[in-house]
Amino acid sequence: VSIGELWRRLIHLFRRERVTVELEEEMRLHLELRADANRKAGMGAGDAESAARRRFGNRGVIQMDSRDAWGLKTLESFTQQFRHAFRSFRRRPLFFAVSTLTLGVALAFSTSVFSLVDGFKHPPNPFPEPERTFWLQWYGAGDPVHPGVTGDQMIEAVRRVDAFDGLASSGIEFKRVRAGNQEGLRTIAPVSSNFFKVLRVRPRIGRDFGDVDGRLLDAVIVSDRLWRASFQNRPSLGGATIAVEERTYTVVGVMPRGMSYAGPFRDTDVWRLGAAGEAQGGAACCFLSAHLRPRAERRSADAQLTTIAAQLTHTFGQVGGRVYGFTLHDLRYSARQLDAGHVALLLAAFCTLFVACANIAALMLARAVARRRDLALRLSLGATQRSLALEQLAEAAVLAVSGGAAGLLLTVWAGAAIGRAIPPEMRWIAMVDPHWSGGLFTMVFGALTCVVLLTGALPAWQVSRIEPMEPLKEASGGSTGRTAHRMKVVVAAEFATALVLLVGASLGVRSAIRIARFDFGFDPGALIGASGRFVYRWDLNLFHWPDAASALLPRVLASPGIVSATTFAIGQPEHNQIYSDITTGGSPPILAGSYLIVGARFFETTRIRLLSGRDFEEGDAARGAVIVDERAVPALFPDGKVLGRRVKFGSPEGPAPWLEVIGVAKRADLEFPSNPDGPRWPPIYATVPHQDPKRWMIVARSSGDVRQAALRLDRTLNSLLPASAPAYVSPYDADYQSLVRSVGINLKLFGALGVASLLLTATGLFAVLAYTVHQRMREFGVRVALGAQRRHLLRLVLRDGGEMALAGTGVGAFGAMLVITLGVPISGPLYGIEPTDPVALIVAEGVLLVVALAACAVPAVRAMRADAVEILRAN
Amino acid sequence: MSIKPSRDEIPPGTLDMLILTTVAREGLLHGFEIASAIERQSASVLQVEEGSLYPALQRLLIKGWLSGTWGRTPENRRARYYRLTAAGRKRLESEVESYQRVARAIALVLRPA
């Protein structure tokens, strides 16, 4: 068939009314001319016309034959089948709605989870030519005394490599960025104006740095991540600005998804124009990026760089035995390793998909059997087997399309919901932006369509084997034993799979509860932690500070919103041993990996309760004092007398001083333990002179909004400290809270998959029970007529449902234990809960059985209402 | 009293060829003229079944071997006139050639020993 012919067929398809009218006109003319000819041959007027009509034949048949020539007949037959399918679904809206929703839910959940995990495993690569674009790592002699080559000199040197057709420079700085309503430390890259041209990356909104920006240095380009988080991913720039420290910049472009490159740093959010090597005032921070000229080979670039390195070494000399050298790193992204959480998510998505497929199969099987009689009747009334088979397939196709449409809507919704649910700090998963992939949607849709068409084809295939009289003779009783059995197996398999998913979800819930209920022993909610470290001694000397912690404490206390603050450090006891004056005699010392060196008013600040004694005061540090956690008392002071006794961090003969115990504190954990069941040292608090003056930690109590207070404190401290020794300030329990949130997200994902599979399984059970009850109504009628009680009927239906649920959950429990034993993760990371936790299994079983009972309720009630007279009369 | 010639049906599969040949020879023709021309040229031996003429014409239009334009008959009636297209001419040549080959073969078989 040529394209021209197809085109003509298509034209006539749309103009079929006109084609029919024209053909009719042609045939009328033919008849008139034939009648004229007959008249001329001597026939009478009436005879001439009827002879012409006789010879011409049936005009209706000719019209049909002509339409056949246009291929319209096949099309009309298809249209008819689809119309029939729609009518059939209109008669059974519940079946249609449940099937469509099953397909939609399965599509949405599987696509979202697959996209999420795929996005993590294969991060989006924004570089169009990743194998020809390089980060050019260079190393060589240089220290503050011998700075060596400068950034500009290095660029000049590398520019001589003619294998490159572009060379760009970038630096790196970590600064406080205020964008939209968000503020925080972000990675900023000062770059040369040709940076993105060399990388061949184009902004997805706005523009690249142009030459004009070389003079207007207030332009920045931001990452897709920052744009989504701070500017709600709006489609145009609309004069957006961001503030870096106190300076305001205009956003001129937004980078595509996944672009966060600036040399070795892959978490850049802001690119601004800057001179080479400007970032931290030294050439050591100048990163170079280069693009390989077309047809040039990497080998030749390497060779030329080796020559340049030798020249640089010759010119600038060796410092500390180091020479200049280059390494090229291409910008190809490699696939990431999936962790147990991802594998569990994938497994859960596959399980949901399987449950949905089984559900569709059960629904279609139930419908197919219920329709046997109807099909047999139509077959005996003259319908062709082909048309009946086509009708079944058309129904399956309509179902697939409606399920696909529902799936598309739900997938878009689920993508947005996941996006809203995942906080940016949830690193294991937030490394990708939640999105949904069209390719994966098509794959899942294809798999589901296959299931629908195959199960839809079953009745079509059965039609060809129907002996019309057989189902008619059976009336509604039906010898459907084998099909009913098949359906029960399918539903039991659904139960088994749903159980595996629910065990995973229950494990997650138990783990999340354990995390959320962790008791620190005090309320860390209003506390702020601030810490930092001076890298260079000369930086610390510049401020004339004996130690950073004591110097910074007054500044912290002066910060608005701070009511009290104290210093905080970790000390290591010699040989991990702590002795008291009464354990030196021979009883074993207390073993501790660390003790806490705290400042005055530590207990006032943290509000850890003191059971006896007093808080640390100014001046305690000079002579040294100790407060012990109540859990340490039995080991250190078996006689229970604590106050006024002495403690030593290290062996009795060691150099550490004996310190007086001035109080006993209530049980408190200052950190969230990574292993809740592992050994935990009870904290022992001591106030002694600072051991490491370069490292500092301060804990402060805020009076109002802890986040605002932390932000203000951050600004105060960082405006004071040098860029090489920034302060890291955050609410004290920020890490714990982000863990709680990330566990919550994990739980929501698994929970959603678990609930979806639970609902699908319940629907499957309901459909099969409803069908079996429908099929057995005649039997129930006979039983009632013979004197059976209603409760016997109830028992019969419940037994049917119970068989499927128990068999399914039994197999499921075995399967879940088997996969857990094989080491397959069925839940996200667990905290303090064993995968074989019996409570999780019992909860999952219980939930499934309750839902199964609920699904049995409606069919059971229907069976109980069986009216013998009415049913037997109907049959 | 003239002897009425015996009428034969058009052999299966040859109607398309006869229509194409007739339109090729006569130029623009409408349906009735095509049927009449075939009868006339076959000395009234072949009688076109009018019921199959119009589906055949539709088929040839679809294939692009004929094109149809609406015009007026000498009696001022509206009629669709058919014309042979370039593709139709090519098709006709190959069909005639194939037919002649078959006819020659049949003649050979039927030749008296």
Image: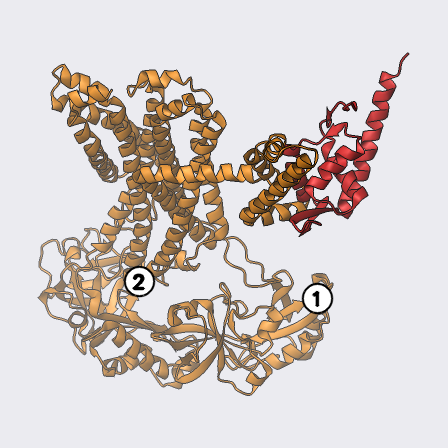
Chain colours: A orange, B red
Residue A524 x/y as whole percent? 21, 65
> Can residue B37 be seen at all in this image of the molecule?
yes
Residue A866 x/y as whole percent? 17, 25
Residue density around tag 1, few if under 14, some if 14–19, many if 20 or more, within 10 Å: some
Q: Nearer the viewer, residue A789 or A666?
A: A789
Mark 1, secondary structure of its residue: helix
Q: Residue reaching furthest right?
A: B113
**Number of numbered discs on residues:** 2
Q: Is residue A443 above or below residue A641?
A: above
Q: Which residue is mark 2?
A: A735
* Mark 1 chain: A
Q: Which mark is residue A528?
A: none
Kind of residue at badge 2: Asp
Q: Is residue A427 above or below residue A46?
A: below
Mark 2, secondary structure of its residue: helix
| Residue at figure coordinates x 24%, y 83% from the top left | A558
> Can residue A645 be seen at all in this image of the molecule?
no
Q: Is residue A796 above or below residue A729?
A: above
| Residue at figure coordinates x 45%, y 29% from the top left | A388
Residue B95 x/y as whole percent? 79, 35
Q: Residue reaching furthest top?
A: B113
Position of the N terminus of chain A by quadrant = top right
Q: Which residue is mark 1?
A: A301
Q: Residue reaching furthest bottom?
A: A215
Q: Is residue B13 left or right of residue A667?
A: right
Position of the C terminus of chain A by quadrant = top left
Q: Is residue A133 above or below residue A454?
A: below
What's the distance in space between the residues labelled 1 and 2, CA to CA? 45 Å
Kind of residue at badge 1: Ala
Residue A551 x/y as whole percent? 30, 81
